[in-house]
Structure formats: C-alpha cells, structure tokens
Amino acid sequence: MKTTALASCLCVVLLAAIPAAAQPAAPAPAASKPYVPQPKPAATDILVGAHNCPLWEADRPELWAQVVKHPERTPALGFYSQEKPEIADWETKWAVEHGVSFFVYCWYRDGQGGPVKMRFSSAIHQALFKSRYVSNMKFTIMWENQARGKAGVADEADLMNNLLPFWMDSYFRHPSYLKMDNKPLLFIYRPEFLVQDLGGVDKVRAALDKMRSACRKAGFDGLYILGEYRGLDPKHLTLMKQLGLDYTFAYCWHVQGSPKPDRAVAAQLDCIKRTQAMNILPQVATVSQGWSGWRDEGSIWKLPPADYKTLLQKAKAIVETFPAQSLGRRMILLDNWNEWSEGHYLAPHREYGFGYLDAVREVFSTAPKEHKDLLPGDLGMGPYDQEYKKRMGQKK
C-alpha cells in the first residue's frame, strides 16, 4: 500500500513538472452560429400594414421567372424559400424597424366543402409561427377566394362549420393576430363572389352576422370584415355595404396609362379621395409603389423612393382627415411587401435596397432617421437560394 501511494505521488509530481506549453490545449469553444439580430421596432403614429404575397415556396421555382427577366427586383434574400423561419425573422426585423407592424397574408383555400385544405400556407404555418421573433410581428389574412368553385365556400354550413372554426383556432386566437377593439380583422379579396356561394345578398349578410356572433361567443367583441375594391364604381361599393362589410380596402389601385411617377402618385391619391367622397362604405387606405402584372401586361409603372415618400406623406395627410375612431384613421395599408413578379414590393432588393422602407420609416415613425440596416451577408449568413438553384438545375 505504501509503495502504491509513493508511486502515485511521484506521478503527480512528474505531471506537475511538465511545462504548460507541452500539455495538450483544451479545445476552443465552438463559435455560435450567427442569427438574425433582435428586431428594434420603430414606433409609428398609426398602424402601418403591408400586403404579403406567400407564393415563394421551394417547390414552385418557376414563379421567379418574371424576376429573372427583371433582375433589378432581385430580393436581398435571393430567390428564397419562404418556408424557413429564418426568412420570416429577417422580414420581421426589416419590417418593424421601418414602422411596418403587421402583414396581411394572402390566404388560399384548396377546395370547397369539408375539412380545410390550403395552398401557399408555409409563410404563416412553417415560417412565421416557428420563427424566433413571431411576437414582434402582427398578422392578418386576406381570403383569396378568386378561384370560383375552388377557393370559396360550398354553402353557409361550410363557412360556419369548417372555415370559420379553422380561422378561429389557427389565426384569430393566435397572440400575434391583429385585433382592433378586441375584434380580429378579416380581409376578403372578392366579397361579391360570396353572393353565388351563399345564395344571395341577404344570405351573405346573415352569414357574416353569424360569423361576428360566433367570434363574440369565442371571447372577442366581434369581427371586422373588410372587402377589396380598387375601382371607382359606386355600385360595387353599394353591394359591399349591402353584404354587411365593415370597411373597404384596395389590394392595389388601377393606375392607367403607364404613367410617370408624378401621375402615378396623383392617380392613387385621387382614388382614395373619391372613394371617401362617395361616403358609401368607409375605407382603409392603400398605396402602392408600382405595378407590372405577372407578364408585363397593361399599365406598367414604378415610383422611385423619393416619389414614394411623397405619396406616403400625402396619403397620411388624407388619412388624418378620416373619422377619429375609424379603422381608416388608425391604420394604412402598403401594397406590397413582396409581390416580386407583379412589380410591387417594399422589401430590400437590388435596385433600391432599403429605399422604400426608409421612406416608410421617415414618414410614419417617430424614431430617428439615422439607423443601421443589416443584410444577411453582413453577418456571414445566407444565401437563401440553394433550393431554387437545386430545383432549377433538376429541371434542365
């Protein structure tokens, strides 16, 4: 026992005598992988929302074809796959730091009747809901019921027993879903199509009232329902009033004749003023920075950031004349965050970078004008187009 103890002591002494440089170095701690920095929201005078186009899924690379033709539109994220939560976090950061506090996601149903199935739902369900900064961004949905017989409702039972419960459980109850006066906001793209789906104007009105009643039973104070309108047709507005809609809004305005920037600004302001002057249905105002259509068809125009800022300033002045407690006085809609193929977009991109978003911040936010914008490459992150390149390579 004494010999063993002596040997142990000698080993300790010998090890202690080895120079420190000769001992194996401890492995360096693994560098943490960079991630989207915490957003720093910019406060605004009114709520600023942006329509969000959720078409950029990994398995639909062909939808980027129009942007390939117009490389100046290339997003700062590249030809990204919207399913990634990291993409949602970049978008949230860029939006809220420039005063955009909510997105209006286009929402597509896949079929009518029976359990709800969706198309192009990954931007919400896979990205936003699983993102780190989901609590920083409010959202609503715009029901894209344009595809007749495929994206609406089969009847009132389908609306009340399938669609509304799905929206209630998936969206309205979500803490990030936008509610005003404790009422969720539901945007409908083609409300007039409900007349055929539900069997008449009176039946649509009754169904919308039942939706509001169901929301009250669920603990809300009702439901705000907004219908899309982009012309200057009083008959269309009158129909939407008869259907029982609370407000109208424009996804974008029909600006005719491929105008120069000053005329595109004036035309949109005129649409907002004339809609208000008709005094048929209150509006939530919308402004756009451009339009081309998916195939460069019809009127094509685009505002540089300086002209877009002018549009925002003048639109804000009009909104400030709306009734004090109306939704129209408390918010404005920007078209569009990321409709890259149709030529209307605010998110950072090749041609103007953060130009459009800086204009939004300068007009609506009380935050200092000077700020630092970050791109993924600044942190050694991205690119996000690997899936696009892979799938396009497979198609060749």
Image: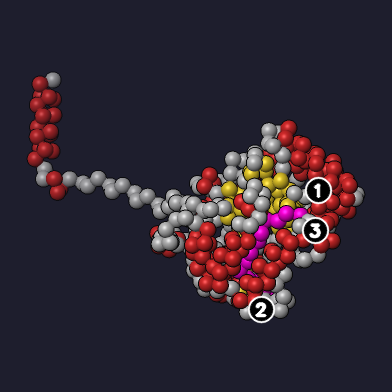
Residue type of the residue flagged with mark 1: Gly
Q: Callout 1 environment at 10 Å: few (<14), some (14 to 19), or many (20+)?
A: many
Q: Is residue 295 magenta?
A: yes
Percent x, y for residue 298?
A: 73, 76
Q: Which image quadrant is residue 270 in?
A: bottom right
Highlighted range, magenta:
281-297
Asked whether the residues under the numbered discs 1 and 2 touch, taking CB atoms below 8 Å apart as contact, a structural biologist would say no
Q: Which image quadrant is residue 26 in?
A: top left
Q: For the point 17% across and 45% down, which residue is it?
A: 23
Which label was assigned to residue 6? none
Q: Earlier in the sequence, mark 3 or mark 1?
A: 3
Foreground pick, 284 / 371: 284
Q: For the point 72% across and 60% down, which residue is it?
A: 276
Compared across the picture, whether 37 is left or right of 235 comes to left
Query: Which residue position is annotated with label 3?
Result: 237
Q: How far apart are the alpha carbons under marks 2 and 3?
A: 26 Å
Q: Earlier in the sequence, mark 2 or mark 3?
A: 3
Q: For the point 40% across and 62% down, which residue is it?
A: 370
Q: Residue furthest top?
A: 1
Query: Which residue position is annotated with label 2?
Result: 259
Percent x, y for residue 273?
A: 69, 64
Q: Secondary structure at mark 2?
A: loop
Labels 2, 3: front one: 3
